[in-house]
Amino acid sequence: MIDLGVSGNNLDLDPENEIKVKAFIHRGQREFREGNYFRALEQFRNALNFAPDHPHAGFYFSKTEKRLNEHIINMFGKAAKEVESLKYSKALISYCAIISFLQDYPERQEYKDAEANIARVEELAGKNKGEYKCF
């Protein structure tokens, strides 16, 4: 059994579910440390499915969402600096990196913003709209 020092006894979990919740949290923490934020969110979401009020699962889920958003903001910041420096080729690569990072989540606003920024940078670089392909 994995001991995370987290007791689910005050949550009235049966022992089998407590083991599952601890395992999901453990895997989520590992994914978080490795920077796999989407995978970590999925693990914490699984833990919350078994124990919706679990304090550690909720804490780590929120922490992971925050870190994911910070990572995406940093990626956009890098691309924006490249546009300001007139390094359009590098900016296109950076925006494509965002799209690649979010490829499984095309409904996210950041994905749509990256696509729009690619079109804007294409125009600034004198390319035709849709000429630059990320993949």
Image (cartoon, helix red, strand yellow):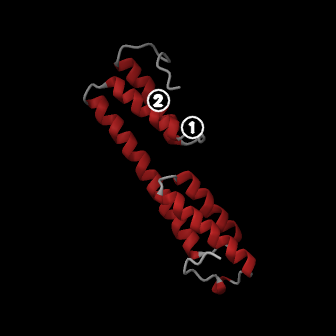
Where residue 30 appears, x then y in whole percent?
52, 61
Give the side of residue 132 with respect to residue 7, left or right.
left
Residue furthest out toward the front: 1
Residue visible at 42% across and 49% down in the picture: 71
Where residue 128 appears, x then y in whole percent?
44, 13
Q: Are marks 2 and 1 in contact (CB under 8 Å)?
A: no
Provide the residue designation for mark 2.
116
Give the Cα separation between the discs numbered 2 and 1.
15 Å
Query: Disc 2 residue type?
Result: Ala
Query: Disc 1 residue type?
Result: Gln
* Image position of 27 with respect to 102: above or below: below
Residue furthest out toward the bottom: 10
Q: Quadrant of residue 97?
A: top left
Q: Is residue 38 visible?
A: yes
Q: Which mark is residue 103?
A: 1
Judging from the image, what secondary structure is the residue with disc 1 in? loop
- Mark 1: give few (<14), some (14-19) or many (20+) Cα within 10 Å: few
